Image (cartoon, rainbow, N blue to C red):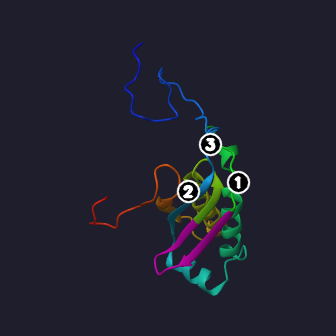
Amino acid sequence: MTNPPDLGLPHIDSRGQARMVDVTAKTPTVRTATARGEVACSERILKALRDGTVPKGDVIATARIAGISAAKKVPDLLPLAHTIGVHGCVVDLDITPTHVAIEATVRTADRTGVEMEALTSVSVAALAVIDMVKGVDRSAYIRRLAIVSKSGGRSGDWSRPMPGQKEE
């Protein structure tokens, strides 16, 4: 068997096997990541969310707490993720005319970034929304989940370009 090409992926060793990256020698720095996603819902559910009349209760508060909790559980879910201190997590949900917009910003002062924590936070917040509305809207679904920005660490700051804008 030949070795796979080196793509520069730190989680893959020279034999192509997955490994946990050793970050022991790295200096802790302040790092932040923001992710966004959406839950597309029917007009009926969006109205019930705005009116606070979803039968299962306060969807927005439940999803916010679910997202915060999820950010702290990433090493339990992703086998190669490091256990890091989640020192801050803000989860915002906004009911728009066509969907529930979710944004999570996670902060740490640690040896590795919090991109996976931000993505997991948005994902689980979105799942909480779907769980609470599925009895009324079986068509609800998650879309457009992505990291939109990160700062800190060796690779520095990055933000997702807006549509039509070239990445720097």
- Residue 135 appears in view: no
Q: Confirm whether the magenta stretch covers residue 89.
A: yes
Q: Confirm whether the magenta stretch covers residue 92.
A: yes
Q: Nearer the viewer, residue 76 or 112?
A: 112
Query: Which quadrant would the C terminus be assigned to in this image?
Result: bottom left
Query: Which quadrant would the N terminus be assigned to in this image?
Result: top left
SS for tag 1?
Answer: loop
Q: Amino acid at mark 2?
A: Leu
Q: Nearer the viewer, residue 86 or 44?
A: 86
Q: Residue furthest top?
A: 1
Q: Residue at x 69, y 57 (%)?
A: 86
Residue at mark 3 to residue at mark 1: CA–CA distance: 12 Å
Give the answer, above or below, for where 56 lies relative to 32. below
Main SS category, magenta section: strand
Circle 2 is placed at which residue position? Answer: 119
Q: Residue at x 65, y 38 (%)?
A: 24
- Residue 37 appears in view: yes
Q: Residues within 10 Å of mark 1 (few under 14, many from 20)?
A: some
Q: Amino acid at mark 1?
A: Gly
Q: Residues within 10 Å of mark 3 (few under 14, many from 20)?
A: some
- Residue 102 lies, in percent from the top left, at 55, 69
State which quadrant residue 45 falls in: bottom right
Circle 1 is placed at which residue position? Answer: 85
State which quadrant residue 52 falls in: bottom right
- What residue span does the magenta drawing correspond to? 88-104
